[in-house]
Image (cartoon, rainbow, N blue to C red):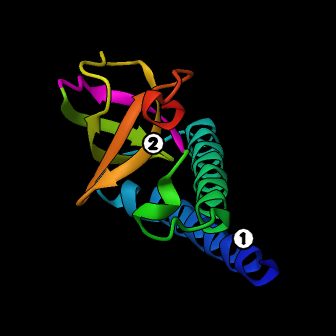
């Protein structure tokens, strides 16, 4: 992780250097003059963007991979496209085709994965009891 941070800092410094060279040497030759305050604002914005991208990338690399559909059982998610009974749900930041176990479920409702049917997830509303399991 430390090596990735060093590479990220080095690459950001190189990008910032290229930005300064372009603004101070390249643009004036084309008749475009950006004031020093504009250059500073541009560099601060680029630095903030680089930090944001680094943090998002680090978070993505730290996430544990989901191993197959059986690993999705009991995961929580939200309905993206109404389930009547088929639709789409977002679970762990990924979109999955799903089938509702209990009829229609509206967009935005929270669901829990209870099984799989081929490559589709079988879901039910969060907090509802599985009647098949209690019989």
Q: Residue at x 59, y 42 (%)?
A: 45
- Identify the residue position indicated by label 2 in the image: 113
| Whether label 1 touches label 2, CB < 8 Å | no
In this view, which residue lies farthest toward the front?
A: 135
Q: Position of residue 6 (x, y in %)?
A: 76, 78
Describe residue 76's horizontal placement relative to residue 54 as left or right. left
Q: Callout 2 environment at 10 Å: few (<14), some (14 to 19), or many (20+)?
A: many
- Identify the residue position indicated by label 1 in the image: 9
Q: Residue at x 55, y 45 (%)?
A: 74
Q: Is residue 50 magenta?
A: no
Which contiguous range is marked in magenta? 75-84
Describe residue 128's horizontal placement relative to residue 52 as left or right. left
Say which mark, if any, is on residue 48: none
133 up-or-down from 27: above or below:
above
Q: Position of residue 68 (x, y in %)?
A: 43, 69
Q: Position of residue 7 (x, y in %)?
A: 68, 80
N-terminal label among 1 and 2: 1
Question: Quick one: 80 or 21, which is closer to the camera?
Answer: 80
27 up-or-down from 2: above or below:
above
Q: Secondary structure at mark 1?
A: helix
Give the CA distance from mark 1 to mark 2. 41 Å
Q: Secondary structure at mark 2?
A: strand
Q: Position of residue 40 (x, y in %)?
A: 64, 43
């Amino acid at each position: 992780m430390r090596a990735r941070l060093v590479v990220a800092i080095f690459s950001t410094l190189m990008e910032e250097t290229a930005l300064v060279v372009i603004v101070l040497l390249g643009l004036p030759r084309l008749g475009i003059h950006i004031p020093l305050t504009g250059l500073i604002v541009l560099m601060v914005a680029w630095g903030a963007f680089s930090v944001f991208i680094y943090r998002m990338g680090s978070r993505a690399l730290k996430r544990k991979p989901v191993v197959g559909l059986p690993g999705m059982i009991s995961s929580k998610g939200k309905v993206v496209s109404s389930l009547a009974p088929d639709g789409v749900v977002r679970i762990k930041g990924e979109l999955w085709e799903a089938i509702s176990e209990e009829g229609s479920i509206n967009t935005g409702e929270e669901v829990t994965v209870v099984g799989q049917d081929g490559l589709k997830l079988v879901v039910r509303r969060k907090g509802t009891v599985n009647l098949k399991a209690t019989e």
